[in-house]
Amino acid sequence: MATVNDLTMHHQYPKQGDSEAAVSVVDLHKSFGRQKVLNGVSLRVARGETLAVLGRSGTGKSVMLRIMVGLEVPDEGSVCILGHGLAGLSLDQLGEVRKRMGFLFQHAALYDSLTIAENVAFPLVHHRRDMSKSDRSDRVNQLLAEVGLEGANDKMPSNISGGMQKRAGLARALALNPEILLLDEPTAGLDPISSREIDELVLKLQREHQMASIVVTHDLHSARTIANRLALLDKGSVVVEGSFEELQESNIAFVKEFLKLA
Amino acid sequence: MGLIPVTTTTPPLLEQAPISPDADRDSTPGLIGNFFEWFGELGIFSWKVLKAGITLPFEGRELIRQLDDVGSKSLPLVALAGGAVGAVMSMEVRFSMARFGATSLLPSAIVYSVIQEMGPIITGLVVSGRVGAGIGAELASMKVTEQIDAMETSAVNPYRLLAATRIVACILMLPLLTVAADACGIVTGWITQTLSQPISFQQFINAGFSGAALRYFLPPTFKTAVFGLIIGLIACYQGMRTRGGAEGVGRSATNSVVISSLFVILADVVLVKLILVLFP
């Protein structure tokens, strides 16, 4: 497997203006009861670009990701995925949009009654019904090899490590060849070596599949490694957005403090 | 692209409470409000399940798995409960009838009591305990570990795959389990009767079913399909609306059993009256 540095060197930073937005959120507001979580978030991610969303716990990063995939409905604002506004879509229409997205949950969210191979095959079983069993098995093996889990087909999620679970979750997210990949804390709870491996894996996959990615993370090192652009959230709003070097030049005290402590 | 300073606020880096979609549960509308909210959400849930259940694709493989889980795995417990009821009925009814010199009517009393009421209600309550708790806990666990969310993000409708299959399995299996409970109840009723006053099984059955028509026995057996609907629907609803980690899973499992048992008993009252009116 290539090192992070090798991959970073090859990582192409797409120009903002030359591609259609894969994900676009405009003035997103969301409250739970009296608690305001998102307060006018606007972001845009181009095809092939990776945006890392950073911020303190409780600033609404994961909620924003859930809104993007239609698991939560915003109070105000709009979400546009690959040219489709999510507002007013029927469940079937939303399903069609979701098939073009992959989502890695913070704790992988593998189906605990299914083996790793069955987990990875799950989207194929339900959406590629014309696929033969042998083709599906080949595809699962290919995906597992891609994330470095060869031979783990028959293992149960409870019998593998957190890092392996994340890899399996990533393989499942990639099963339908998504155009957008959403990653919720991909390195949370992992040791530094496993975190680095996940970073390398995400970089490799981005390079090979050219997906638009949004990574929600607390891990500044990880964000710096895998993202073209970083956005810092605080109190439900984007405080600052730019490359890591640009964030370092910021005069905003919160940004300085965050970068210092992260 | 340059740096985009969106705001210049400088809040201190104090730890904030993590945001979760459960946060809106803090604004509890009170007991009466909760009561109506519960029923309102149940109505919406039922509509989603109905819509998902009657549209393609049908989840045949999952349905077969659930039929096995609800049916064959509940059979030993239901048979045991039915058998116990038959034996107790036989002892209790014998004592009462002996006082009036009507022990010859004992087979009929046992057969009618078991098939018309005791078998169905015991089956309903036993399945509510075993299957209701199982479905409630399983779906609750899937909910809090984001497995149901993962299913949705994979564009698979959890109302179709998880809820509709379990509810249909409960509806189909309850009448069959009731027949098993009835059969066990009648057999143990006969055994208990024979221990006090020997009688052949053939005689017991002939006496028990003398003058009976199918309309006496079919409606009470098929009313348990309604019990199945109640158990499946409430267990799936409680499971899929779970919030709050392990504590929430436990609460959902308990609520599934308590609420579905209560509704089974209430539904029984209504259904018995309905059967008496429709099949006099």
Image (cartoon, rainbow, N blue to C red):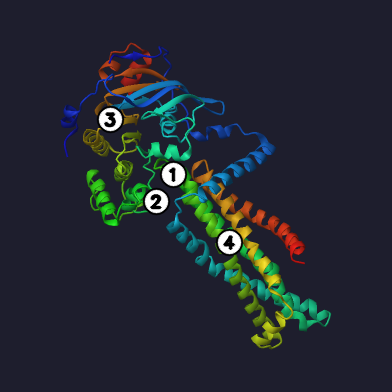
Task: Name the residue furthest right.
Answer: B100
In the displayed structure, would residue A256 be above or below residue A69? above
Residue closer to the observer: A54 or B202: B202
> What's the chain of the residue with tag 3?
A
Which quadrant of the view contains residue A197?
top left
**Given contact means CB atoms under 8 Å apart, are the residues at marks 1 and 2 in contact?**
yes
Are labels 2 and 3 assigned to the same chain?
Answer: yes
Find the distance from the CA under tag 4 to the CA under tag 2: 24 Å
Residue closer to the observer: A47 or B8: A47
Residue at 29%, 55% in the rendered image: A132
Badge 1 density bin: few <14, some 14–19, many ≥20, Cα 10 Å: many
Which quadrant of the view contains residue B204?
bottom right
Q: What's the amino acid at mark 2?
A: Asp
> What's the chain of the residue with tag 2?
A
Residue A112 — which label? 2
Which of the two discs, 2 and 3, sits closer to the camera? 2
For mark 3, what is the residue? Answer: A222
A202 vs A103, left or right, is left
Q: Position of residue A44 (x, y in %)?
A: 35, 23
For the residue labelled by badge 2, is the local secondary structure a helix, a strand or a loop? loop
Find the distance from the CA under tag 4 to the CA under tag 3: 50 Å
Q: Is residue A63 visible?
A: yes
For mark 1, what is the residue? Answer: B145
In the displayed structure, would residue A179 be above or below residue B203? above
Labels 4 and 1: the sequence-earlier one: 4
For mark 4, what is the residue? Answer: B127
